[in-house]
């Protein structure tokens, strides 16, 4: 079983059990004890988005890796909605 806490506040690449791949910043970590369904989970802000998050239960992640050399991203607040958004740093 993957320990998702180790990925909190990191740029990651996630391969889900359905084969889809996601790259983004882990913004939220929820331990199993705090989850209504009893599963450890994380949410990422996918790279190149306007701040929406994609959540993953640990059981739905086939592979996760920290991207040390990934294009750095900056998390800012959208000026109108005040929602977090991931922006690539040039």
Image (cartoon, helix red, strand yellow):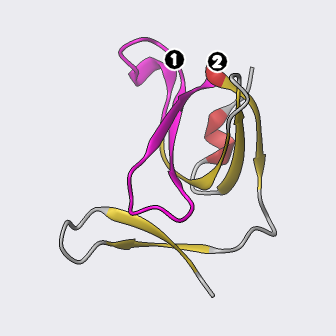
Q: Residue at x 58, y 72 (%)?
A: 73
Task: Tell me whether the residue at label 1 lies in contact with that at label 2, contact meaning CB atoms closer than 8 angstroms.
Answer: yes
The quarter of the picture where the C terminus appears is bottom right
Q: Nearer the viewer, residue 19 or 14?
A: 19
- Which segment did they paint magenta? 29-58
Q: Would residue 48 be counted in the magenta stretch?
A: yes
At x 71%, y 73%, the residue is 71
Q: Which mark is residue 59?
A: 2
Position in image of residue 36 (x %, y %): 35, 15
Q: Secondary structure at mark 2?
A: helix
Residue 27, percent across and down? 48, 52
Left or right, residue 65 beside residue 84: right
Vertical order, 85 against 21 (above or below): below
Residue 39 circle label: 1
Which circle, 1 or 2, is nearer the viewer?
2
Outermost residue to the bottom: 90
Q: Nearer the viewer, residue 47 or 9?
A: 47
Q: Residue at x 63, y 22 (%)?
A: 60
């Amino acid at each position: 079983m993957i320990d998702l806490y180790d990925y909190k506040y990191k740029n990651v690449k996630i391969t889900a059990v359905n084969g889809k791949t996601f790259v983004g910043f882990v913004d939220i970590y929820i331990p199993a004890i705090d989850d209504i369904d009893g599963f450890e989970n994380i949410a990422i802000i996918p790279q190149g988005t306007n701040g929406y998050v994609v959540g993953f239960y640990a059981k739905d992640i086939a592979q996760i890796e920290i991207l040390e050399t990934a294009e750095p991203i900056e998390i800012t607040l959208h000026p109108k909605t005040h929602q977090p958004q991931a922006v690539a740093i040039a």
